Image: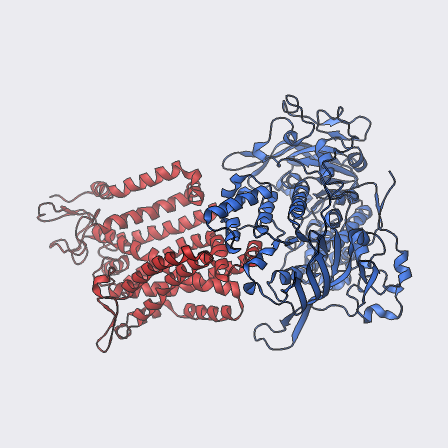
Amino acid sequence: MEPLNGLEITGRILWQFLPVWISLIVVFALSLHFKRRLGLYGKLFDSPIGMIGFGFVMFWIFTGFYAAFDMIITHDPLAQISGLKNEPPGSALRDPGPGEYPWYLLGGDNLARDVFSRMVKGSSIVIGIAPLATIFAFMVGITMGLPAGYYGGRLDTVLSFLANLILAFPVILLFFLLVTPEIIAAGVPSFMAMVLFFFPIVFFTVLLNSRYHSQPKIRTPLLIVVVGALLWGYLALISSEGYLVQTETYAIPLLPQALDFINTSSGFLVVFVAVVFVNSPTVYRIVRGLAMDIKTRDYVAAAQTRGEGPWYIMLWEILPNARGPLIVDFCLRIGYTTILLGTLGFFGLGLSPESPNWGATINDGRKLLSIYLHPALPPALALLSLVLGLNLLADGLREESLKD
Amino acid sequence: MSRDDYEGPILEIDNLSISFFTRLREIPAVMDFSVTVQPGEAVGLVGESGCGKSTVALGVMRDLGKNGRIVGGTVKFKGRDMGDMSDEELREIRGSEVAMIYQEPMASLNPAMKIGKQLMEVPMIHQGMNAEKARERALQVVTDVKLPDPARILDSFPHQLSGGQQQRIVIAMALMAEPSLLILDEPTTALDVTVEAAVVELVKELGKKYGTSMLFISHNLGLVLETCDRICVMYSGEAVETGSIEDVFDKMQHPYTQALFRSIPLPGANKNDRPLKAIPGNFPLPHERPPGCNFGPRCDYFEEGRCNAAEIPMFEVAGDDRHGTRCLRFEEIDWNAPMQLMETKTKGEIGPVVLKMDNLKKYYEVAANALFGGGQKKVVKANETLTFEAHESETLAIVGESGCGKSTFAKVLMGLETATDGTIMLDNRSIGDVPIEKRDAKTIGEVQMVFQNPFDTLNPSMTVGRQIIRALEVFGIGKNEAERRERMLQLLDLVKLPREFADRMPRQLSGGQKQRVGIARAFAGDARIVVADEPVSALDVSVQAAVTDLLMEIQREHKTTLLFISHDLSIVRYLSDRVMVMYLGHVVELGTTDQVFSPPYHPYTEALLSAVPIADTSVEKEHIVLEGDIPSAMNPPPGCPFQTRCRWKKDVPDNLCEREVPPMRQMAEGHQVKCHLADDILARMSPVIKIAAE
């Protein structure tokens, strides 16, 4: 086989992304067609900035999604093929087996793995962790920020102090601490996960209870179903292989393996916990500020005068009306989380060293940067375009939500 | 151009049209608008919100933002077309020749700059004056706007002044450069009535002193009557009637002007015998204006095929001075025909006592040092010894300016705060020290509230129906969702809103409609006592009448006790049975409406009555301008709370006013006044408002 020239490489890469293009076209066509009926989301399509950002973001979401099912990628991201170490983009395999893709589209890295496939596969990791971790950070931030802003006073002082304490701690140092084997062995990440992952349960329980407490007939079954499901998910998430913590010295058994439907590697858990932990204080502050502003509105007073409980007011009167700034911040925060994940991978913290996450691939490529540009550049550009897209999307949303 | 040698109209606006451009369409905000302001003349621009009056002002200043554009007509300032001026020339004129005063004083002052510096800037920039002279001038102007201790004021920051003082500084700043034209955009809306009266008095006086022409934008016909020489009534982007104050007020030639006057409570209007006449229908949206006459669909004199055929030009009314109307039929309509009386309503029977307050007190403790809670505690006396009764199907008006304690009182009654002392009896249950969490659903449902700001009273992210259903759920009404939905629809019928509104979001409703939803929500639990906290003050006049009427009608049907909190004495006189006047936490006067509105008055009631602008040329008012501002409740004056501003204080011997809080004195059956004045002085008081014989 002949190596490919630049044009062919571009053409073949674009062809590999075909499912993504189709999905993007469908989404844009539908959204543009129905944009007048889609509220804020529809308005996004009036702003070129927002549309470009949305395009970038959706590109990576689709890529991550399809790559999770091993579409788009051309080779196993962990497989090494001899003779392709540090080969330039478009290099042909020496003797491709039947059905094997005969080129490394973006060349090989220093362990002779396919750069293109690793970059594509890396997006799955980001798309899997970043939004979810951000959602958890929001749950924690909202659950603490609402009462702090609504009640004020001493509760606010204490919670704000805690938030400041976490924010004042150097983030990288915190990560190094969390991945230290001794700390993991002591089960600290597991305990932190236990606390942080409990917030969504609190959040949804209070949300539903405050809404339906006057109608026990609906409330009780609803709560049993929802809280039951959440609790199960919670236990599955924090327990691995039947144990909450399993160290050489002690072990705390938890959910039996038969019921454990989420398998979290401990590295994944550490990254997740770390990201949620450092993001939630910032969310807390935003929510607290918004709650303080909105609690002075007449509709909050109206809710008070008809005897609503404080949690109903916080979750059903204040929170929905704070959604605008929160949505914008959510987009930005996914971007920060993405960068944070990149940083973690770059330092080799958390996820396993051979995993194709972008941070780790950039770090691997960096060592030979003066000789070979191609292994480091694609993941770096991928990271850049996703974060840029998220920022543009946030800008677009903010701009459009301010307009009539 | 030299400033002084121009003789002719200061401002000529000729067929001005202004449009705003949005993504979807062009929205015409002002169409074919003409007005002329002569030197020294004050022209009032009146209309409801959204009629384009502020846009005219911005158009004159050429400050329409990115979306706005002048699409036709000319604005001439001292004979020069402002459209031909360069940006530099415009900048030169703004602030020095044309000055503008906005509604929110705090927003027009730079909070990070001392007052003196802000004032000095004006002549330093425009006239190149040196700092020393500029400061002299600033001192002079601050003295002119009658602020106490001008030197100290110059050295303070805006937040250290009260709202009234801030507005005076804004006026001073506008006058610094001795402009030929002053544009006032609702300059007193954010102020209390007595403060407003003082500011209006000041503006009038300064206008005369400096010979400044004024363009006075307001929604309040009474204010315009007091300040202006000429008036221009706007409706939906067009001037519908212009003329001198006397011509427009007494010989109106446009149906909208007439309808407007019939919908405001003038002395003589009465909720039972002479109810207000609301203008039917709604204000048209700028892009949904009807063909022909904009007012057509709401007009009593509408003629199909004629009024909606073509654009209607301005007609000159023969025999009057520059009196114009935009009505085709103005010569056919009999303007003197009396208003067709709608059926007079029977007065509701006043029933037994439902609510009884006895010696209610509410004090707040404010820690001097908020962070550590230590130090000396200050006590804010928000309510002092409130004692009154309210009967079934009675309207009790609670009147007072900001800081008088009426909101605190409402909070205590609702259970959001508990009373420091005294009792509140609802029927025979004491509720004064029961916070809302401990009240049962029935009690909560029985005592409800209607809020002031219609744009804030509904949760913006919940449908209208959902919000009412939620109230029903909380009050435990209806067995299931279907029953509650049915009840919710009935409530919408009650407040005369179409049932489709149940699925609308609040932002799709107009202010008046939102307020109706607020009323429906308050009546969800079959409320027996409703506290209405200025329910109509944020609404346009034509809508006010309809909402007030609705409240009265529901009251008649449900025998509700209405506690109507307001500072607007015209509406209070119109709808209340009894009136309670509050000042700094004290009830200073309590009696039936007739008793309170006629002498003997409490000195504060007297001042309040005189401060309210009345849009009737036949009313003669005594002008009583209160000095200074309301004292802070943190630091109330010793003795009588009103003694710092009272004009009768000198008639009480031995400085009694400064030493002792006056006792509540029984003047007549059910009429109480808290004052030291001797009986014979009180008896000598003359009525503040006199209606000239017709």
Q: Position of residue A190 (x, y in %)?
A: 30, 69
Letter of the chain in blue: B
Could you say which quadrant of the image residue A131 lies in? bottom left
Q: Is residue B318 left or right of residue B56?
A: right
Which quadrant: the C terminus of chain B?
A: top right
Q: Is residue B87 left or right of residue A247?
A: right
Q: Position of residue A342 (x, y in %)?
A: 31, 59
Q: Position of residue A143 (x, y in %)?
A: 43, 62
Q: Nearer the viewer, residue A244 or A403?
A: A244
Work out whether B566 lies above or below B342: below
Residue in view at x 53 percent, y 46 percent: B487
Q: Position of residue B632 (x, y in %)?
A: 71, 65
Q: Nearer the viewer, residue A348 or A64?
A: A64
Residue in view at x 25 percent, y 44 percent: A17
The residue furthest top is: B305
Letter of the chain in red: A
Q: Nearer the viewer, residue A118 or A165?
A: A165
